[in-house]
Image: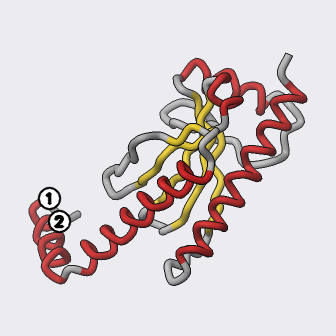
Amino acid sequence: MESFSEYIDEYKELMRKGVVRKAYQGVMQYIMALRTYFSTKYPDYFVSGSIYFGYMDMTYFSFQPESFKQRKLRVAIVFIHETCQFQIWLAGYNKLVQSKYWKLLRESDWNGYPIVPSTNGVDSIIEYTIVQDTDFTDLDGLTHQIENSALRFIQDIETFLILHEN
């Protein structure tokens, strides 16, 4: 196994070449523009004011309609750095809310998006890949693909909740 010092040497070399830095900056600029797009186009939805930039593992922002906010649920548009995929996550504002909705989905006839196996140690209820092979050559197309998937996801979850909540 390599040492931390060896990792730093490799990191410095990659940073010197500049490719990783430029790619990371491009991805962050796109995600900031995506958050702004959602905020502008959907003023009735709550779009988080900030972006979680992560530790080069994931970067995300939340986006949810009032009905989710009232239930203390949030939707996150998540970029997974290792695979360069976009995912959409359903999460609760806290562990209690997360557990409540996780159980509701697990104990129902839900056959939609994949539910996480356990709420222990995770921040989501559902994690679903919405862009498998991310193409950054057509940013408008990518934005519309993410937007359409997010709206469909929200509608599917809202329909389920209307039918299954007391």
The structure residue drawn at horizontal position 86% and vertical position 16%, both measured from the top left corner, is 166
Q: CA distance from mark 2 to mark 1?
A: 5 Å
Q: Position of residue 8 (x, y in %)?
A: 13, 65
Q: Quadrant of the N terminus?
A: bottom left
Q: Is residue 107 left or right of residue 133?
A: right
Residue 12 drawn at (x, y percent): 12, 72
Where is residue 130 shown, x and y percent of the image? Answer: 65, 61
**Quadrant in the rendering for residue 72:** top right
Q: What's the residue type where badge 1 is placed?
A: Phe
Between 18 and 111, the one nearer to me in the picture: 18
* 26 horizontally vs 3: left or right: right
Q: Is residue 116 above or below residue 27?
A: above
Q: Which element is circle 2 on?
A: helix
Circle 1: is it few (<14), some (14-19), or many (20+) Cα within 10 Å?
Answer: few
Q: Which mark is residue 71?
A: none
Q: Quadrant of residue 64?
A: top right
Picture layout, residue 103 above or below residue 36? above
Residue type pointed to by label 2:
Tyr
Residue at 17% x, 74% y is 15
- Tell me what residue is drawn at x 47 percent, y 59 percent: 80
Name the secondary structure under disc 1: helix
Q: Report x, y in % for residue 32.
A: 41, 58
Residues marked 2 and 1 touching at CB (< 8 Å): yes
Residue under label 2, please give it.
7
Q: Please tell me which residue lies in front, 44 or 85.
A: 44
**Can you identify the residue that label 1 sits on?**
4
Position of 35 relative to 111 (above/below): below
